[in-house]
Image (cartoon, grey):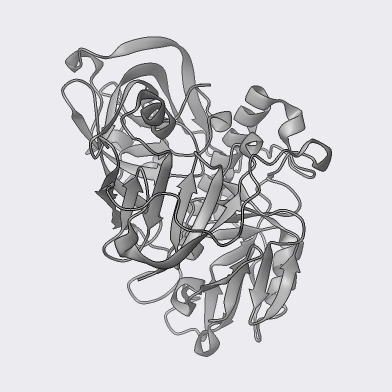
């Protein structure tokens, strides 16, 4: 969500087609994705999707509260608002220098996770790397609930570099649960990239919505303006301390061979030039699109224009304002509302759209039919559920939240050095 038009200050005006900011020589973090919104029989996991919507709603509610506290209400885009906490129950009833880390597809494209370590003794954790938030949290040894069972837990007494700080970290959920705990600093390492004195929370309470998930916690990679700690996120700290030379990281998200690349771009994973777009740092998000350049297209026709887009690796789906998403689906033959409360739509399974794209004034970046399709309404249904839904997250009247259903189609680059997001074609 952009600052109001009278206050907009773009950090950089960039060409929409440019040579890579940084290439090669980085280190990769292998990342994986496991949970899915499509069941084994090919049908749509409606219950899981509702959980995803509720979690996304609460994440961005917390982001907006942090942004208001850190930057002031003037940072809010027109139409942005802090939503009430979503009610889960009622919803159901209706690098040294540059480093790369492999990623695992957790939840069959629900989140992307990989290994990190915390502390002098390198306590291991399996973490969701999230460009839509700015804080790091993991379970604590003091979390004794069943939700924490089987997860890696941080033990401050086992690390000589651990330090307790004042304050409390907390995210509240509509079912009465929360993610909460004290605030600490310690050494955090991701694929050889180290940040000393990094703020994080070893949480003592973990929402039941995280039960059964392989990941231990979340590492936020957005701007400091979204931080509840009011401190630099991990990657910014590493850049400031010189353990990563370039303030650039990049994602390839796929069923296999997924990677988070820290400190540059991995030219082995994409072809051609990277198309970059300016970010407004005051928003806190990796938000791109200005003027009338950002559009949603069906074929060559722009069906929704003049939008802002937040690129969020921690979100599976693509959210748009309900009225704009309704306009979008009018261009998809045979589409219809599936769940009016959460904003899901369906279209005929024998005609899954393969010509949906986003454009920011340069190339049109297409979403594949496979990534548009979340599965059949039921195992024998002829209607399939779309990955674009109309749901108000409070981010602003023209703001779209663009998650993995889009990012899986492109090589995505995030540059703090140039305050830009870039896309390139995958090899």
The outermost residue toward the right is 6
Residue sitting nearer the eye, 398 or 416? 416
- The image quadrant that residue 186 belongs to is top left
| Quadrant where the C terminus is found in the figure | bottom left
Residue sitting nearer the eye, 302 or 174? 302
Residue sitting nearer the eye, 243 or 140? 243
| Quadrant where the N terminus is found in the figure | top right
The residue shown at (67%, 54%) is 289
Residue sitting nearer the eye, 329 or 270? 270
Q: Residue 151: percent from the left, percent from the top?
A: 24, 37
Q: Residue 387: percent from the left, percent from the top?
A: 54, 67
Residue 46 in the image: above or below residue 76: below
Residue 87 in the image: above or below residue 408: above
The outermost residue toward the front is 19
Q: Residue 134: percent from the left, percent from the top?
A: 48, 34
Q: Using the rendered image of the protein, determine whether residue 203 is visible from the camera's viewpoint.
A: no
Q: Residue 199: percent from the left, percent from the top?
A: 40, 21
Q: Using the rendered image of the protein, determine whether residue 80 is visible from the camera's viewpoint.
A: yes
- The image quadrant that residue 335 belongs to is bottom right
- The image quadrant that residue 346 belongs to is bottom right
The outermost residue toward the bottom is 350
* Left or right: 4, with 345 as reference point: right
The residue shown at (65%, 86%) is 334
């Amino acid at each position: 969500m952009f600052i109001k038009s009278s206050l907009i200050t773009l950090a950089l005006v960039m060409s929409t087609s440019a040579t890579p900011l940084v290439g090669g020589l980085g280190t990769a973090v292998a990342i994986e994705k496991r949970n899915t919104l499509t069941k084994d029989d090919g049908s749509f996991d409606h219950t899981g999707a509702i959980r995803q919507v509720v979690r996304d709603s609460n994440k961005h509610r917390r982001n907006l509260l942090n942004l208001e506290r850190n930057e002031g209400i003037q940072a809010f885009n027109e139409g942005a608002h802090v939503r009430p906490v979503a009610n889960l129950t009622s919803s159901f009833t209706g690098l040294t220098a540059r480093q790369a880390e492999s990623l695992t597809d957790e939840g069959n494209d629900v989140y992307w996770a990989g290994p990190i370590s915390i502390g002098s003794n390198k306590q291991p954790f399996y973490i969701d790397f999230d460009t839509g938030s700015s804080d790091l949290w993991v379970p604590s040894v003091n979390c004794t609930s069943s939700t924490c069972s089987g997860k890696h837990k941080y033990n401050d007494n086992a690390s000589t570099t651990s330090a307790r700080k004042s304050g409390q970290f907390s995210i509240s959920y509509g079912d009465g649960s929360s993610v909460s705990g004290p605030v600490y600093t310690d050494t955090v390492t991701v694929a050889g990239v180290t940040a000393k004195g990094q703020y994080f929370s070893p949480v003592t309470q973990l929402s039941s919505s995280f039960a059964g998930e392989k990941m231990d916690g979340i590492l936020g990679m957005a701007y400091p303006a979204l931080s509840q700690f009011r401190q630099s996120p991990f990657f910014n700290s590493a850049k400031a301390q010189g353990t990563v030379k370039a303030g650039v990281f990049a994602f390839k998200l796929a069923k296999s061979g997924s990677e988070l690349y820290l400190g540059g771009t991995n030219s082995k994973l994409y072809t051609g030039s990277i198309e970059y777009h300016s970010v407004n740092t005051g928003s806190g998000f990796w938000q791109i699109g200005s003027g009338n350049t950002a559009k949603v297209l069906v074929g060559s026709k722009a069906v929704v224009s003049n939008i802002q887009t937040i690129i969020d690796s921690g979100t599976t789906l693509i959210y748009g304002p309900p009225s704009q998403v309704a306009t979008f689906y009018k261009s998809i033959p045979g589409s219809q509302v599936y769940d009016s409360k959460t904003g899901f739509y369906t279209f005929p399974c024998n005609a899954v759209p393969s010509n949906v794209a986003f454009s920011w004034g340069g190339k049109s970046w297409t979403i594949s039919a496979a990534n548009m399709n979340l599965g059949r309404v039921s195992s024998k249904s002829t209607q399939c559920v779309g990955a674009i839904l109309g749901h108000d997250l409070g981010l602003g009247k023209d703001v779209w939240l663009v998650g993995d259903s889009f990012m899986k189609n492109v090589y995505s680059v995030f540059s703090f050095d140039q305050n830009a997001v870039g896309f390139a074609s995958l090899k």
